Amino acid sequence: MNLRIPGPTPLPPQVEAALRRPMINHRGAAFADLQKRIVARLQQVFETTNDILIFPASGTGGLEAALVNVLSPGDRVLACSAGAFGERFAEIAAAFGARVDQVSFPWGAAIDPASVAEKLRAAPDTRAVLVTHNETSTGVLQPVEAIAQAVREHSNALVIVDAVSSLGATRLATDAWGIDVVITGSQKALMSPPGAAILSISAHAWHAYEAARAPRFYWDWKEWKKWAVKGETPFTPALPIYFALDAALDLILTEGLPMVYARHARLAEWTRTRAQTLGLALFPDPRYASPAVTALRPPAGVDAGRLIRHVRDQLDVEFAGGQGALSGKIIRIGHLGYVHEADLQRALDALEHAMAEVELVSV
């Protein structure tokens, strides 16, 4: 199967091999060395000197872990929303009793930093601003650097960024951009299986932790940091994911982060260009098109869901469909992580073949 979805992504052979390593004692020296090595290299990818914590969880678990450690019920939060995952971030905050204001934009559009600033001026008690860096539901890379600057200039709010599908595919300069909490997952551009949520936590966020009263036990940052200092974790870690991350980070940093980002940008541009020659239209604003996933509208009269099923069942290529209001209306092509030109060439060739077949029965 040519897996061309926004995640989980295919695994490099070196990562697959690492998954076959025997288990080790997670209270022993070997694990302490492994965790230390992984964290040091993750700091390079995050571009941060902040604390890094690794939770056995999905990316959504990481979002919850971020919010419950810095918020109390009744705290005011500004959620930036222009897609399904921005809305999910807001829903998690609301579930823990936050008063959620939203600055919303049409799906496929970029978040306007000036609108964020305006909202913050009107609500100076805002404790946190939530942003999804790469909105995979729409194929938009949001201007996080400019948004973070607007937050810093107009409030003392924390900047909390969902980078689940962006970290490792495009630059995210955590410290230079003034981001307090960054959340990512192992299963996207980090080229590892699902199972680890990874958080970068600033001093500003740790200060907020001391006043936060949202309920937490498993997600408690202080408990995880206490054990991390000893080279351990408070609860059983997902050891195979650590092995996988260790191997994947070797590959990423050997290739070099600038080269990794350039490869993602090049493959994204190639995908968009080829898809448009087939008669598909780019869904988002081209100025903010994602380097990790391309969202496309099929020609009039062609059902996107039917096209996706045909490619999967007949040609062994897996694309993703639309979510929510975009269900059946767009095709999403993942080009993040362990992906190269040949993978996308085969996938787009299959899409071209499928469109000829599906159009005949759709018009």
Image (spheres, helix red, strand yellow):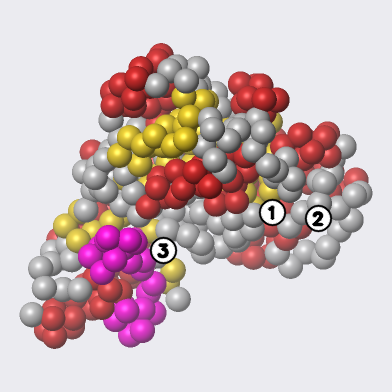
Mark 2 lies on residue: 236
> Horizontal and vertical percent for residue 140?
32, 45
Q: Is the Cβ of the residue at disc 2 closer than 8 Å to that at disc 1?
A: yes
Camera-near label (3 vs 2) is: 2
Q: Nearer the viewer, mark 1 or mark 3?
A: 1
Q: What is the magenta range?
A: 309-333
Left or right: where 135 falls relative to 24? left
Q: Nearer the viewer, residue 257 or 334?
A: 334
Res 231 seen here: yes
Q: Amino acid at mark 1?
A: Pro
The answer to which of 288 and 122 lies nearer the viewer is 122
Callout 3: few (<14), some (14-19), or many (20+) C-alpha neighbours within 10 Å? many
Dot label at residue 5: 3
Tell me the element at label 2.
loop
| Marks 3 & 2, CB-CB < 8 Å contact | no
Dot 2: within a 10 Å radius of its alpha carbon, few (fewer than 14), some, or many (20 or more) residues? few
Q: Which residue occupies 44% across, 53% down?
A: 336
User: Element under label 1?
Assistant: strand
Give yes or no for residue 318 being in the magenta stretch. yes
Q: Are marks 1 and 3 in contact (CB under 8 Å)?
A: no
Residue underneath mark 1: 56
Name the residue located 60 percent from the left edge and 60 percent from the top edge.
194
Pick the residue in front: 190 or 132: 132
The disc, 3 or 2, on the residue closer to the chain's N-terminal end is 3
Separation of marks 2 and 1 at Cα, in angstroms: 8 Å
Kindly report the distance in space between the C-alpha atoms of the residues bearing marks 1 and 3: 22 Å
Residue type beneath disc 2: Thr
Q: Which image quarter is the C terminus in?
A: bottom left
